[in-house]
Amino acid sequence: MSQPRLLARVALAACFTPLLPVAHAQTFPTKPITLVVPHSAGGTSDILARTVAAEAGKTLGQTIIIENKGGANGTIAAKQVATSAPDGYTLLLATASTHGINPSLYSRISYDAVKDFTPVTLLATVPNVLVIGPNVKAANVQELIGYIRGQGDKTNMGSAGAGTPGHLAGEMFKSSAKLAFTHVPYKGGSPAITDLIGGQIDFMFTTIPGVLPHVKAGTLRALAVTSPERSPALPDVPTMAESGLPGFQAVSWHGVVAPSGTPDAVVAKLNQALSGALAAPAVKQRLMEEGAQASNVNTAAFGKFIQTEIATWAQAVKDSGATAN
């Protein structure tokens, strides 16, 4: 081949090569998308993911498949997505654990919560609620503080496990109110709630859905929620800040992230579809039933939110002394 013809082909290739990512973004998606959920089926994370994915899939014209991959506080699922192709077809339901707590909780972690992911959008926040068992005589947070101080470290706080948002919310409570009590970690929220109802433990911080039926039935008493505002699911329950602990905030949350390097146009299309799903009345209603509050932020704001969460939970992990290998 003559040199002029060769140079002409090289120039032609150079002209079209930059268009390939753009063309991919314009046609995306051409096949089903997988959203990896770092928890087992049936819980709040799973329900939220399936609700939003079903609606967003309509906009994208493709099914969003939910893949449940629990274990190791979400690190297994996070690593899987972090090492997946950055093409928008494998996403992670990021949580306060995977992208807030784990970077400080684990001495060795298999992914970087910031560098290995591209934020897509924050879906919803889920406030924790402070609940007490039938043996504790307290009508509000200040009375609980007085009760704990009177009992000393004989008071027991349960949690779904060491290093979980509920445990660390309790550590924030201990630090901010200058309290002493004993932490009793369980293997999941359900057994902890069962023992709370039975009086084996005195109080716990947990997400609203698991205890809402018991609060409504009167077997547990909700004293405060840990979000900046009251929860629509428990409108008569004050916030921790309203209860005399200004600045107290320990919110669980769910968002969507993609592998680092995912094209901006693909991320924008995913953000648009997910944001639209959150605006659907049926989705809003379902999230409210789960004690979740729909959110809608752009990718840059979600990225800043993740970095703030990492710093916030780092202090709570330090105060708690919790570690994981």
Image: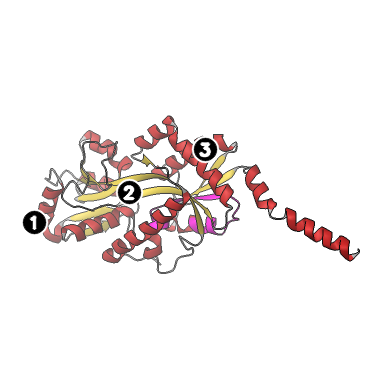
Q: Which residues are magenta?
A: 78-100
Name the mark on residue 56: 3
Task: Verify whether residue 82 appears in magenta.
Answer: yes
Query: Which residue is situated farthest in the left direction here?
Result: 150
Viewer-side residue, 123 vs 217 = 123
**Amino acid type of disc 3?**
Ala
Do the numbered discs 2 and 3 sit on residues whose CB atoms are within 8 Å? no
Residue position marked by numbered label 1 in the rendering? 150
Q: Label 3 near label 1: C-beta < 8 Å?
A: no
> Image check: 103 left or right of 185?
right
Could you say whether the residue bearing mark 1 is in a helix, strand or loop? helix
Q: Please tell me how crowded label 1 is: few (under 14), some (14-19), or many (20+) other residues with Cα within 10 Å.
A: few
- Give whichever of discs 2 and 3 has the lower sequence position: 3
Up/down of 213 relative to 310, above or below: above
- In the rendered image, residue 82, in percent from the top left (x then y), is placed at 53, 58
Mark 2 is surrounded, within 10 Å at the Cα level, by few (under 14), some (14 to 19) or many (20 or more) other residues, namely many
- Among the 4 quarters of the image, the one containing residue 26: top right
Can you give x and y, in whole percent of width and height, for residue 143 in the image?
11, 48
Q: Secondary structure at mark 3?
A: helix
Q: Closer to us: mark 1 or mark 3?
A: 3
The answer to whether residue 237 is above or below residue 141 is: above
